[in-house]
Amino acid sequence: MSLFPRNILVLATRNEGKVKEMQLYLEGRGVEIVTASSLGLPDVPETGTTFEDNAMLKAVGYGEAAGLAVMADDSGLEASALGGAPGVYTADWAGPERNFRMAMSRLQREVEAAGEDRRANFVSVVILRWPDGRILRARGEVCGRLIFPGRGTGGFGYNPVFMPDGDTKTFAEMTATERARYSHRRRAMDKVLAELDR
């Protein structure tokens, strides 16, 4: 018996970096992974004020449109000096073109103007929803510090300016395998997958 209807799981993201990362964590589970964009599903507005809100909006919206099981993630960077900003607006800071170079410049300006605090954390909330309304949810976090100017070219988003606690490399200087040891999304996914394996 398959875990999901038609043995298909929809990833509720159009971010190719997230797709690759989540596919990596789901390898070997014998399930067909598809994306919301590959199914031509309409965008689900992310109007929530928390990561949990937005992940749920995507899980429900794409799930009802597709009639399939959906795994949705909402994630972002929280800078201590900015009271947790950009937080749920992490992608919005990059503008409609998703220009993260611009977003990192803004982050540097605002953090440096706020003082010496460089503490930050990445947060990911993953929600898995079945067509019958059953839900699994998990939250993953990784703490670290902001590094200005950014270093490295790997990964995506704010990776060049974030160094996890316990390492001397930014996420962008790491290989995908190295990054996975710390990944906030990996930590949330591991919790969801552990529940599936019970």
Image (cartoon, rainbow, N blue to C red):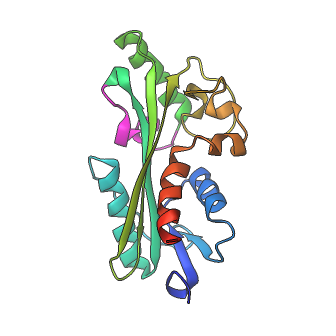
* Residue in the picture at 59% in, 17% down: 149
**The stretch drawn in magenta includes residue 62:** no
Image position of 3 with respect to 197: above or below: below
Image position of 115 with respect to 151: above or below: above
**The stretch drawn in magenta includes residue 92:** yes
Front-most of residues 176 and 141: 141
- Hey, which quadrant is residue 35 in on the image? bottom right
x, y percentage for residue 174? 70, 35
- Quadrant (top left, top right, bottom left, bottom right) of the N terminus: bottom right
Image position of 39 with respect to 145: above or below: below
In the image, the segment drawn in magenta is 83-98
- Hey, which quadrant is residue 8 in on the image? bottom right
Q: Main secondary structure of the magenta part?
A: loop
Q: From the viewer's perspective, is 106 left or right of 22?
A: left
* Residue in the picture at 36% in, 70% down: 135
* Residue in the picture at 44% in, 79% down: 66
What is the number of callouts on the image?
Answer: 0
Front-most of residues 107 and 96: 107
Image position of 146 with respect to 8: above or below: above
* Residue in the picture at 46% in, 76% down: 69
x, y percentage for residue 6? 54, 87
Can residue 95 be seen by looking at this rendering?
no
Among all residues in the image, which is located at the extreme front? Answer: 198
x, y percentage for residue 130? 41, 77
x, y percentage for residue 180? 63, 45
Can residue 195 be seen by looking at this rendering?
yes
Q: From the viewer's perspective, is 149 left or right of 92?
A: right
Q: From the viewer's perspective, is 106 left or right of 153?
A: left
